[in-house]
Image (cartoon, coloured by chain):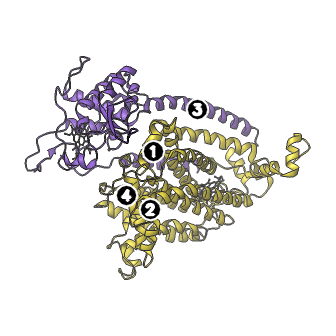
Chain colours: A purple, B yellow
Amino acid sequence: MKMNMMKTSAAALAFVATVMVSGTSFAAGDTPRAPAQNWSFNKLFGSFEPAAAQRGFQVYKEVCSGCHSMSLLSYRHLSQLGFSEDEVKAIAASVEVTAGPNDEGEMFERPGIPADRFKAPFANVQAAAAANNGKAPPDLSLMTKARVGGADYVYGLLVGYEEAPSGVEVPEGGNYNKYFPGHVIAMGPPLSDESVEYTDGTKPTLSQHAKDVTTFMAWAAEPEMEARKRMGVKVLLFLLVLTGMLYAVKRKVWENLH
Amino acid sequence: MDTNNMHPVMKWVEYRLPVFSFLDHSLGTQYPTPKNLNYWWNFGSLAGLVLVIMIASGIVLAMHYTAHVDYAFDSVERIMRDVNYGWLIRYIHMNGGSMFFIVVYIHMFRGLYFGSYQAPRELLWMIGVFILLAMMATAFMGYVLPWGQMSFWGATVITNLFSAIPLVGDSIVTLLWGGFSVDNPTLNRFFSLHYLMPFVIVGLVVVHIWALHVHGSNNPTGIDVKSEQDTIGFHPYFTTKDLFGMGLFMMFFMFFVFYAPNFFGEPDNYIPANPLVTPAHIVPEWYFLPYYAILRAFTGDFLVYQVISLGGLLMDAKLAGVLAMFASILLLLFMPWLDGAKVRSCSFRPIMAMAFWIFVLDCLVLGYIGGKPAEGNFITIGQWATFYYFAHLLVIVPLVSRLERPRQLPDSINASVLKAAE
Ligand code: HEM
């Protein structure tokens, strides 16, 4: 009878698991899911590939930053990707930021410093929307966490531009994208082969650009990920040993019963 | 308690404030506990553990959080990025919410299966239902605090439900909002209440455990303790067993914190709240999905609605849905009387046991439907599952419990343990 109950409850648990897994995959209408890529950072103990993330930052800086802010990042955070202190300073100094007010009460322009947030391309959402056919380009700091499909979706989006199938009307200022919910996106294809000149000899293909910038965005969304996974191993091993010992204690105590 | 062997300091304290004998009678050698409790009885202490973890992590989060519509989202991201181990604290609190509901739902289903709500534990059970309600309020308001898209739109949808109440509904909604839409005053009062409610829960848990200690735990056989042979001291037996359970549970909990911290979450909540853009699917947190399914099952053509509203005369479908949603929980208060059996445990009530597992399945189906868009077959399935939920509580339990002839009960807890050991 006890066995029976255990079996039933195991079945129930399996059912919960299935429901949970399938429950997280809300499909958006007829838009297909972007195929899964083999991301190093999505593996259980995986990390960000620093070279890819650095190239991704270059893509962001040279292409995406013309339209998209990443306002949760500061230049100093880039040292995590393996940029040296001087490189970070130089990157920060390459932009002019508005600071102040000074003692005369005036705002002034100065070169950026590592503590500054990434400079946004537009003064506000309205200006951003006005410059982009009425659709403001969203901030990219959390993008891979903020979309169903995560990094796979972002990558799919960047490489997913194609001719609209016959019969589908794409309105003025719109572009057809296979993976964007509803297919019509205000962003034109931002990347193509050789959009950016890499200095490390990597072949500058569209898919390479897209992979690199997605890796960079994944890091930007979860800069704590590597530290988190490293700590997780220690915590779980500690708990495993502790629980094993607690089990031994429990066995020992209960042994004397009846 | 034998005070003679005590350390002089302990003795000094004990004479003035008998904390040590109090502990010994609550969690110690002097608290007799049925010796046959299985691992389903671990979930009460696990709930207590999660409650402590939630309060501790929540207090630290509150030190860094800013309850203002312009800063809330960024202040949470600041915790994630710039506060030392802020990501750890936040992920513990975020996943702790889900853990709390997993543990408490199992705890409640345990009570349902073994008839723990029956006399003389009715009040204990009813306090439990109030704890669940308090937890739901706390979790709902907590989810609003990061001020993401789901925070905002979840708050809007759920607070709007109260507008279905006749006459006073709109005033209640205005009171909840502190204005005419979900806005800064709403966020501020939700933060205040979210900080308050856990301490209300602590108070309820104290009363819950007080009531528990009057008659002690029920047990898998559901029969009363008859002699000292049936029990063992809580310490060392259940202290060690509970600690082992906590170790296992913490491994489960920490796996999510470190390796799948956003598993229970919605991507949309990483988009800052925007009152002008409605998300495609507004879904509450997973632990509210069954109630959400019940709420949405009530459409104009749902037969149950037609019946309870006398063909739509008494109330509109929205009000019926809201009432049904609250009734789905409040009905549990009446379990001790809906169940008329003389025997507690479903282990000796095979038909009731089967009904129990179908009910569990029904709750899972409701949860599944709650997460799906309200269209096509999902609506029909949700309506049948809603119908069954109430049919179980209002028809199946009262009838089966009174008609089913239970199996032969063991003579005593001790006898059942000895028999199982054979
Ligand atoms: C904050 C949440 C809660 C905490 C901390 C808590 C804590 C506890 C603890 C420590 C026990 C004794 C150990 C056990 O029997 O597992 C217990 C027993 C019990 N709880 Fe809870 N509980 C909570 C919520 C609930 C809820 C929501 C219900 C049901 C509506 C409930 C119903 C019961 C019942 C009926 C018992 C006695 C069970 C028995 O001895 O068979 N509890 N609770």
Q: Give the image quarter of residue A66.
A: top left
Q: Residue furthest right?
A: B4
Callout 2 amino acid:
Tyr
Q: Taking B260 as reference, is B157 above or below it?
A: below
- Say which label, 2 or 1, has the lower sequence index: 1
Mark closest to the chain's N terminus, 2 or 4: 4
Q: Are marks 2 and 4 on the same chain?
A: yes
Q: Nearer the viewer, residue A26 or A232?
A: A232
Q: Are marks 2 and 3 on the same chain?
A: no
In space, the residues marked 2 and 4 are separated at their CA atoms by 17 Å
Looking at the rendered structure, the secondary structure element under dot 3 is: helix
Expressed as whole percent of the image width and height from the top left, the position of residue B262 reads: 42, 42
Crowd class of label 4 (few under 14; some 14 to 19; many from 20; radius 10 Å): many
Left or right for B393, reference A157: right
Name the subunit of mark 2: B
Residue, far front:
A104
Which residue matches tag 3? A240
Lateral position of residue A153 relative to residue B316, left or right: left
Q: Please name which of the two marks, 4 or 1, marks the residue nearer to the observer.
A: 1
Residue B383 locus on image (x, y percent): 37, 66
Dot 4 amino acid type: Trp
The residue that label 2 is drawn on is B291
The residue identified by callout 1 is B76
Tell whether label 1 touches label 2 (CB within 8 Å).
Answer: no
Task: Give how far across and how far down residue B207 sits, in percent.
Answer: 68, 60
* Dot 3 beta carbon under 8 Å from ligand 1: no
Q: Which residue is mark 4?
A: B153
- The x and y percentages for residue A104 are 38, 40
Can residue B422 be seen by looking at this rendering? no
Say which amino acid is labelled 1: Val
